Image (cartoon, rainbow, N blue to C red):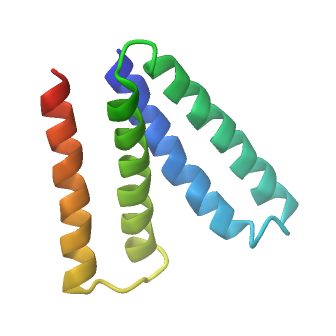
Amino acid sequence: MAWILLLLAGALEVFWAFGMKASEGFTRPLWSAVTLAGMAASVALLAVAMRSLPLGTAYAVWTGIGALGAFLLGILVLGEATTPLRLGSAALILAGLVGLKIASD
């Protein structure tokens, strides 16, 4: 169950990262409120997951999901660049997340 909560927390991190971009520096009230709510929910789920997962693993996976998710959303929705170096770097983050999951079992 902790891993499911951690995945949800990571998904919410992607959501609030996108919301922060959409809030245009917290100048758009609705997107700003949605972003802050997403942040609170994401951290709350992370805290619950950390009850049974190691700190380093949980935090690294949470930030990794957020980083990869925001990276993909930037490419797919915002038209950001897909260079070989960016894609390779994202693949290294993914490999690290898989390694942490395997090592924690």
Does 40 sit left or right of 67 as displayed?
Answer: right
| In front of the other: 82 or 46 | 46
Does 99 sit left or right of 13 as displayed?
Answer: left
| Residue drawn 17% across the image and 42% down it | 98
Residue 37 to residue 75: above or below: above
| Residue drawn 45% across the image and 21% down it | 50
Residue 31 percent location from the top left of the image: 75, 58
Q: Answer with the quarter of the image where residue 6 lies.
A: top left
Residue 36 percent location from the top left of the image: 74, 46
| In front of the other: 105 or 55 | 55
Quadrant of the frame with the C terminus: top left
| In front of the other: 89 or 4 | 89
| Residue drawn 25% across the image and 86% down it | 83
Q: How many numbered callouts?
A: 0
Q: Answer with the quarter of the image where residue 25 lies.
A: bottom right
Residue 100 to residue 105: above or below: below
Does 99 sit left or right of 32 as displayed?
Answer: left
Q: Residue furthest front?
A: 56
Quadrant of the frame with the N terminus: top left
Residue 10 to residue 82: above or below: above
| Residue drawn 41% across the image and 58% down it | 67
Residue 77 percent location from the top left of the image: 46, 73
Residue 7 percent location from the top left of the image: 38, 34
Q: Answer with the quarter of the image where residue 2 lies.
A: top left
Does 5 sit left or right of 16 as displayed?
Answer: left
